[in-house]
Amino acid sequence: MPMPGDPSFAREERRARAREAAAAATPERIQELKSRYEPIDPDPPRPARRSSRRQRSQTVIDSAAIAAIARTCLDEHPGTWTSYAELCSAAGLDRQLALVVARHLVPEPTSEHWFRIRNGEGVYNMPTDEAERGDIVRFSPAEADRRLEEIGVRVVDRRADRRRKLVWTTTGWQLQR
């Protein structure tokens, strides 16, 4: 929100007054004003980020292909874990789609590796649909941490050891440095 000393403050103040007036105006008055005045030019377009929200929402996510990537990399690298963002990178998707991939990638398609796929901080979050089914033990964070420690990855404060994290690079899967 602009501050009173900011040059855009007056514009924001005018917009707020216009919104209040429009909310109180009758439909006839609004139509009269629209016909009398030309619309003001909109703000100049902002430069796009790497990918816009609209582009990301139109991206097709093939959860079976991502699950296959996860199974392959984790089969080849025992005693490791990876994140949803790294799987996005390996699948050629924007890393910002990690939360979407996490929702699509339920434990079953990744078979025995479900507990080795975590968020970027190494924390396992139980899939919402498993909690809704009432199976809060089978895919619980405690069970995921226990199983990860069984394969030799330390878990401290629910976070997996970052030295055992697989990251996707231009040359393939490697341990994080």
Image (cartoon, rainbow, N blue to C red):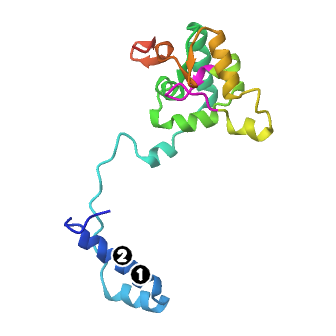
Q: Residue at x 79, y 38 (%)?
A: 133
Q: Residue at x 80, y 37 (%)?
A: 134
Image x and y of residue 139, in percent? 72, 27
Q: Secondary structure at mark 2?
A: helix
Image x and y of residue 170, in percent? 39, 17
| In-image side of 157 versus 35 (left or right) | right
Query: Magenta includes 135?
Result: no
Amino acid type of the residue that numbered disc 2 sits on in the rendered structure: Ala
Q: Secondary structure at mark 1?
A: helix
Q: Residue at x 36, y 75 (%)?
A: 16
Asked if labels 1 and 2 touch by Cβ distance under 8 angstroms, the answer is yes
Q: Residue at x 50, y 13 (%)?
A: 164
Q: Nearer the viewer, residue 167 or 141?
A: 141
Asked where in the image residue 147 lies, by quadrant, the reply is top right
Write down the region rendered in magenta.
116-125
Residue at numbered disc 2: 16
Report the magenta stretch's main SS. Answer: loop
Q: Report the quarter where the C terminus lies.
A: top left
Image x and y of residue 98, in percent? 52, 34
Query: Magenta includes 119?
Result: yes
| In-image side of 169 versus 166 (left or right) | left
Residue at numbered disc 1: 20
Q: Is residue 141 visible?
A: yes
Indicate whether 41 appears above or below 55: below
- CA–CA distance in space, label 2 to label 1: 6 Å
